[in-house]
Structures are given as C-alpha cells and as structure tokens.
C-alpha cells in the first residue's frame, strides 16, 4: 500500500512538470537562485577608498625619497662658472650610484658639498657646487701661460669659455682628493682658489640635462 501511494505521488509530480510552461519554470528557478545583494554603506566605501589612496601616496613618497637619496636627483645651475657647457637655469640629473663602485674620472662633471675651506669663507654646508674633474690622486696640475697642464702635458680644452688669465704653480693631488675647475676659468671659484676637493664631499655625477628642451642630452 505504501508503495502504491509513493508511485502515485511521483506520477502526480511528473504530470505537474509536464503541464508547466517554460516561463513558470524560469520564475520558479529565479525565486530559488536569486538572493538579496548586500550594498556597501557609502560612508564605509568612502573611508575605504581614502585609506587606499593614502597608502598609495605614502608608498610613492617613500620611493621618491629613497630615489633622491640614493639613486638620482635633479639640480639646477645657479651661476656662470660652467659656461659654455652649462648655462644659468639648466636643469640636470645628478646620478649617485656609480661613485659607490668607482672614483670620479678625469673630465666628469661632479656636484659636491663645499669643503671646509669654502665653509670658512661663509658658504653654507648644503650649498652644492658643480665643477669638472681635472686631476685625480697623484697627478700634477699646473696653470701657466693660459694653459692647464696635467703631469707636465698641456691640455687641449675646446669646452672652456676662454683660457685662464692666471698662473698657478704645479701641485700634486693628494690621496682621497680631486682637483676641480669650472669651464668658465676666469669666473669660477674652484680648486685653483681654495684647494683640493675631498672625494667624500662628492654628491654625484652630473650626467644628463633635461631642461631646456632645445638643449636636452648628456653633459
């Protein structure tokens, strides 16, 4: 008897499915599948987005500080001491990494903190200077008759503004120091006036001019 009732119920259910239309089946399915969606509170969404934006900003600032401190930084030329190579207002990229692995080379343009000699003359510690490396440790530098000599050999310098109009006796660059000069020889406070530059004062190597656009390129 129980078996007959079970078969009858199954038969009635199959008849009900047979008589159902596709629309009624979809309606039944939709009532089963769809669930109410939770809407995020607008104020909570605002604060979440603000928190994410602040985190991104903090990361960007940290990266900028690290890059400026250890990789590279922009600098501008405030004086005429490096004419005609660099003009007043030129913007440069100063690269800081390479000098951790090697010493500055002859002819490179370096940016440096003023040595003690200049600080005693009133220049602040954070006023950076920019000059060209003319002598490295052990080399002899001399200026006479409008010519710079390195190890008694006159230098051919087609990048200077004009020949130097002063004389300087031969000096030997000590260990750990550099002899630097401005390309505008007669309008530059450089090693001929205040002495040798400690290598530890070098900030970096001026390698690229990014402004003005018409003179963009390596320096």
Image (cartoon, grey):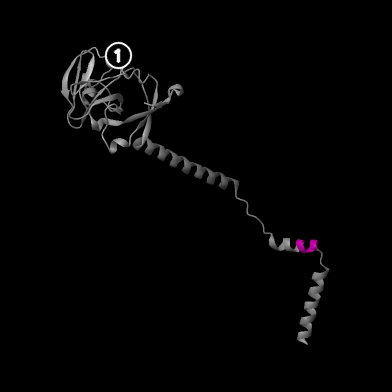
Q: Which quadrant is the N terminus positioned in?
A: bottom right
Specify whether residue 208 is in view.
yes
Q: Residue at label 1?
A: 162
Residue 25 image-quadrant placement: bottom right
**Residue 142 pos. (x, y %):** 19, 19
Q: Does 128 sit left or right of 89 as displayed? A: left
Q: Give the prevailing secondary structure in the magenta stretch.
A: helix
Residue 23 belongs to magenta span: yes
**Residues drawn in magenta:** 22-26
**Residue 197 pos. (x, y %):** 23, 27
Q: Which quadrant is the C terminus positioned in?
A: top left
Q: Nearer the viewer, residue 200 or 149?
A: 149
Neighbours of disc 1 within 10 Å: few (<14), some (14-19), many (20+): some
Specify whether residue 127 is in view.
no
The residue depicted at 81 percent of the width and 70 percent of the height is 18
Q: Does 80 sit left or right of 148 as displayed? A: right
Q: The residue tagged with tag 1: helix, strand or loop?
A: loop
**Residue 30 pos. (x, y %):** 73, 60
**Residue 96 pos. (x, y %):** 33, 34
Q: Does 93 sit left or right of 45 as displayed? A: left
Residue 20 belongs to magenta span: no
């Amino acid at each position: 008897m129980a078996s007959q009732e079970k078969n009858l119920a199954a038969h009635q259910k199959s008849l009900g499915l047979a008589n159902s239309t596709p629309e009624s089946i979809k309606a039944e399915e939709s009532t089963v599948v769809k669930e109410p969606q939770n809407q995020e509170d607008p104020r909570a969404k605002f604060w979440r987005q603000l928190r994410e934006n602040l985190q991104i900003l903090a990361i960007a600032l940290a990266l900028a500080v690290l890059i400026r401190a250890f990789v590279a930084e922009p600098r501008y030329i405030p004086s005429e001491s490096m004419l005609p190579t660099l003009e007043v207002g030129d913007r440069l990229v100063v690269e800081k990494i390479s000098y951790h692995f090697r010493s500055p080379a002859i002819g490179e343009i370096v940016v440096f903190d003023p040595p003690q000699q200049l600080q005693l003359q009133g220049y602040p510690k954070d006023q950076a200077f920019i000059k060209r490396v003319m002598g490295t440790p052990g080399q002899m530098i001399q200026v006479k008759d409008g010519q710079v000599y390195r190890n008694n050999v006159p230098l051919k310098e087609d990048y200077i503004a004009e020949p130097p109009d002063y004389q300087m006796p031969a000096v030997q660059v000590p260990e750990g120091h550099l002899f630097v000069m401005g390309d505008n020889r007669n309008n530059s406070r450089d090693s001929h006036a205040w002495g040798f530059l400690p290598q530890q004062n070098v900030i970096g190597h001026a390698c690229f001019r990014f402004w003005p656009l018409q003179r963009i390129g390596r320096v």
